[in-house]
Amino acid sequence: MSTEKSKMTVVVDFDATLANYDNWDKHGENPGDPREDVVQGLQRLKDAGWIIGIHSTRNTEVIKEWIIKHNLSELIDFVNDNPDQPEGCSSKPIAFAYIDDRGIRYDGTNMNKVVDSILDGTMEPWYKE
């Protein structure tokens, strides 16, 4: 994978990011409905030429079926396995950015703040804020 192509890839978490937690049964067969704001944002990226991938702990086949059910096949380029990943790389897809409901941004100077937010319980996913 060229550096140029990795700069054109965005990887999105599935549960509570692309799919709502509404009607969600924990890692079962019924993911929530698509979050319209996320679909619209990803469509903007797609229209600008970006590659869109999903990286999730949820079963890959369940996600692929969900994508088809919600007519998002033209939007999502891969699920969990980036086909452009160089041979021998880990399973984390190479991307310019990762979008996740539980992500904490490390900025090169804030590791103590990141760890404190985990240890003291102040780090909350958006749906618990």
Image: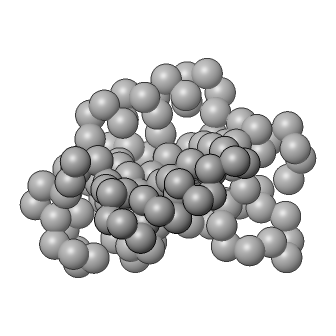
- Residue 91, horizontal then vertical, whole percent: 67, 73
Q: Nearer the viewer, residue 90 or 103?
A: 103
Q: Residue 58 appears at what percent x and percent y?
A: 38, 73
Does residue 67 show up? no
Quarter of the figure with residue 34: top left
Residue 27 horizontal/vertical position (percent) = 27, 76
Looking at the image, is 60 positioned above or below residue 83?
A: below
Scheme of image coloration: one colour
In screen coordinates, is 19 left or right of 11?
Answer: left
Is residue 16 left or right of 90 when viewed as pictured? left
Q: List x then y, in percent, for residue 42.
A: 46, 33
Which residue is nearer to you in this view: 126 or 11?
126
- Residue found farthest to the right: 2
Question: Exactly how many numbered labels are in the figure?
Answer: 0
Residue drawn at x 80%, y 72% is: 89
Residue in view at x 32 percent, y 43 percent: 71
Residue at 35% in and 48% down: 18
